[in-house]
Image: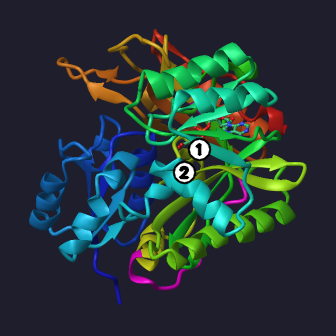
Amino acid sequence: MEKQKKTILVVGSGGREHAIVDAISRSPQAGRIICAPGNAGIAAQAECVDIPVTDIDALLKLAREEGVDLTVVGPEAALAAGIADAFRAEGLRIFGPTKSAARIESSKEFAKQIMMKYGIPTGAYETFTEFEPAWEYVSRRPLPAVIKYDGLAAGKGVVVATTYEEAEAALRDMLLDATFGKGKVIVEEFLSGPEFSFMAVVSGEKVYPLAIAQDHKRAYDGDKGPNTGGMGAYSPVPFITDDVREEALEKVLKAAAKAMVAEGVPFTGVLYGGLILTAEGPKVIEFNARFGDPETEVVLPRLESDIVELFEAAVDGGECELRWSPKAYLGVVMAAEGYPGKYVKGVRIEGLDSISGKAYHMGTALGADGSLQSAGGRVLMVVGAGETLAEANAGVLADIGRIKADGLFHRTDIGKAAL
Ligand code: AMP
Ligand code: GLY
């Protein structure tokens, strides 16, 4: 018997949401796919509706009027605004954690307390609300100093200071000048080792691990330049052995899912572990309560089983098996010159129909003349597959060569450290 086609709403407007829409469109259960607000690339695969991700009343109205069967949430802003609570209160099925469960991302202190209480491996830390004691503490400790603002700071709330001047300036910024609003600061033990991203679809204590990926946060080749939202990613990650994966799955992801249930804030959605492989094993740098961006753009293309079945298993508490492509997937971000600082706007983009891989749109819009233009710092993520990472990288760089976009830049060494 053929399953009834479903109407699915995806909330968000970036490359992550494009990859989610793309994965949903491969599902035999997918009927209409709606995306709010979406972008120019997503519009080719979904009906885009111009509603901001935090306008929960308007999203609820849309879901009711369009008979949406399942809503999938991309960005943390929507979760922190309580979208999952509001939808559930109306009996609408939504894939994403409640506002209280999303605190595992929105409050670093909450995340740290959970990790300490349940023995989840992470760096030691102290919390401060006043500048003086914080500076006194940091100035007596060895460098580098890891200083984190306790709240959402659009990826800019973490400073790894290699000098005391830098550390003092960061504390001043966060505690005296309240750059991100009045808040707390966490000073954390510096951890060293390669980083990797391990996401899982979580439903209470049930954990479905996703394929591991690695992000590249620095703007330029050789991991030089400022921190960004992520300039490229790849999956699988060869230096993560099965043993390390198993250890991270048990001690981090499954332990965290269990802890959230025990704390009375069961988690439904994607739990993202930002991990570092230290000499003592994998430790948590951060948790996110959502799909990672740009990791999702290389992880979901590897998923061969039905993603709608996975989302529904999480929302309804069913069972589901995942199948993954063994191929290497690699993606390179094309960003606007100047990013992550002040960047050029409205760059014209041509040639996307001549590439052999896939271009996920991170920040694009149609200009008044109907041409494709950049509409953000990170613009496109070009993703390709290969038998090896090197092959995938060569294919992606060749694709980028086919794209005409004066004013965008990209890294050429994504995945190189793993080769
Ligand atoms: P986050 O925004 O929490 O992902 O942190 C940004 C980056 O800061 C991470 O990707 C790490 O490279 C670095 N970082 C954060 N916490 C630590 C830590 N405890 N030790 C070393 N590096 C860290
Ligand atoms: N790629 C890191 C993040 O999504 O937060």
In percent of width and height, residue 152 lies at 43, 40
Q: Residue at x 85, y 37 (%)?
A: 419
Predominant secondary structure, magenta span = loop
Name the one closer to the observer, 346 or 94: 94
- Snapshot quadrant of residue 163: top right
Is 408 covered by the magenta stretch?
Answer: no
Magenta stretch: give its range.
315-332
Q: Residues within 10 Å of mark 2 (few under 14, many from 20)?
A: many
Dot 2 and dot 1 residues touching (CB under 8 Å)? yes
Q: Is 248 left, or right, of 265 in this rendering? A: right
- Snapshot quadrant of residue 90: bottom left
| Nearer mark to the viewer, of 2 and 1 | 1
Q: Mark 2 to mark 1: distance in Å?
A: 8 Å
In percent of width and height, residue 307 lies at 47, 67
Q: Residue at x 35, y 60 (%)?
A: 99
Q: Residues within 10 Å of mark 1 (few under 14, many from 20)?
A: some
Q: Residue at x 50, y 38 (%)?
A: 129
Would you name the residue on which mark 2 appears? 109
User: Does residue 310 appear in the picture of this structure?
Assistant: yes
Is 327 covered by the magenta stretch?
Answer: yes
Give the secondary structure at mark 2: helix
Would you name the residue on which mark 1 appears? 127
Identified by mark 1, the residue type is: Thr
Specify the label residue 180 is tagged with. Answer: none
Identified by mark 2, the residue type is: Glu
